[in-house]
Amino acid sequence: MAISSFVLWALRWSEFDLAVLLSSGDRFAEFFSRLVPPDWSVSKLVFRSTIETLMIAIAGTAVAVVFSLPLGFLAASNVSPPWISHPVKWLLGFIRSIPLIVVAMLFVAAVGLGPFPGMLAIAFHSVGMLGKFYAEEFETAEKGILDAVSGTGATWSQTLRYGLWPQSIPQVVAFTVYRLEMNFRDAAVLGLVGAGGVGYYILLYVRGFQYEKVAVLLVVIIGVVLMLDNLTFWVRRWVR
Amino acid sequence: MKVIELDSVHVLYGSSLALDIEHLEIGAGERVFVLGHSGSGKTTLARLIKGRLRPSSGTVRVLGRDPASARDRRRRQRRVAMIDQEYFLVPRLTAVENVLQGALGRVPPWMSFFGIYPRTEWIEAESVLAEVELDGLGHRRVETLSGGQKQRTAIARALMQQADIILADEPVSALDPELAEDALELLVACVARREVTLLVDLHQPELARRYATRFLGLAQGRLVYDGSPEGFTDEIAELVYRGRPADEAAGSDLASPRLTLDAQETKHVDAETGLATANPRSDIRLVGD
């Protein structure tokens, strides 16, 4: 009861209006009708910038993994003492809470326009989530195994490497490829603030009402997302 | 030579007494089997000796040192191997990779960071695997092995450690009786070749009898029998396995460190089993008697 009235309140807040939505069918139809025929002349340009977005996502994810793994170990309460794991968790939460678009604007201001600030923004933002996911995954590790490995006389780092890591690999890989997929979609809008990739053209064509060109954008972006989705599936199957 | 020594050891979990041992000494090369039902303190004793647990009071000395102290931890951990009831192998790693972990205490950390083990350790791991009759299965992931094979892998990892003491906590409880017998025989044979001190927690006295040089009987965290396997009579077994004091007060009597076998308790055993309880034979030592 309390929840449903809260949701109703939220709907009111967002100016939900069923009448407007129902009468909008014509405008949707008009939008879709203007997508065809797609203007394939821009396909080369769109394709190139989509690849740039993909590369931003890949590089950003890779950089994020390099930072997230050690932070994940430090944030995991089963292998790090609370005076380390708590502040690191807090730090990861802080990183997560800054909207990506804000991070991207900051980096654009700091290092200039282009794909480089985009990659930095993706990397920074991903660390917040990947570090948290990794830490949570490490925390599910079987304690008995950690004790057993450490009981052989293994050092802390050896225990992580041989007791914790082999238990966590499949989930760590799954999270990482999932994050890569998300990063591609995130990177696609980074061009809005001048941080490289296909986002710039989205802004340009949508604002310029050039829907024939937007159609090409949609086709290429959806194609890449589907491809990544497949990749995720295969990688997860492969690493078990 | 004493390798394990406990003095006035109390272990409390919250307010309940898990272990209460006045004095216990185990010498080098002994094969001690600890008997008692679940919750009698067998695992607690093993964990104390391994250094995973500190006593609430009293001293524990293993190879002359406090096993739970942080100083020189790596070397001390290496000298005491533990085989857990659930084995705690890494399921995704192969059998030989799990066995190689036994060598971590002597492999330089930088080397193992890259997953490298010295050649000599690989040769050792293969030979230990052959010793536990798993030759040819080293490349298999542990998750694909049978229960008996996992058990042998766990034994191999402990042997690989080249420890002075091997602790085994209910090592065969997950196996069916025949496999359990084989595994225990194998463990004892491997240990005998190495002149290692062995301490095994076990439920089944009849199985332990074949391999032990000494029996310890634990009930309610207290040592109620310490002597030869021959002296572990049915009456004593009754006491160890069924001798739960009828009144819980006796179990939580912290003031008295030794279990006193009062008449009421003996009568309780009688009533439950219908057996006449003879006095303990004079050639065995009943703690508290």
Image: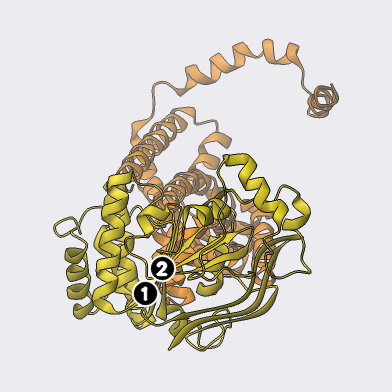
Chain colours: A orange, B yellow
Choose between B288 and B62: the one closer to the eye. Answer: B288
Q: Is residue A58 left or right of residue A135?
A: left
Q: Is residue B22 left or right of residue B144?
A: right
Residue B56 in the image: state x and y as whole percent. 70, 73
SS of the residue under disc 1 = helix
Choose between A189 and B229: the one closer to the eye. Answer: B229
SS of the residue under disc 2 = helix
**Where A87 falls versus B140 (above or below)?**
below
Residue A164 in sight: no
Q: Residue A161 carries which label?
A: 2
Amino acid type of the residue tagged 2 in the rendering: Arg
Q: What is the distance, in whole Å, between disc 2 and disc 1 at their CAs? A: 7 Å
Residue A29 in the image: state x and y as whole percent. 54, 14
Tell me which residue sits at (39%, 47%) in the image: B174
Residue beneath disc 1: B113
Using a 10 Å C-alpha cutoff, classify the residue at mark 1 as few (fewer than 14 neighbours), some (14 to 19) or many (20 or more). Answer: some
**Chain under numbered label 1:** B
Q: Are marks 2 and 1 on the same chain?
A: no
In the displayed image of the protein, which residue is found farthest to the left? B136
Counting every numbered tag in the picture gives: 2
Tell me which residue sits at (29%, 66%) in the image: B188
Q: Is residue B221 left or right of residue A11?
A: left
Amino acid type of the residue tagged 1 in the rendering: Phe
Residue B128 in the image: state x and y as whole percent. 21, 69
Q: Is residue A151 left or right of residue B38?
A: left
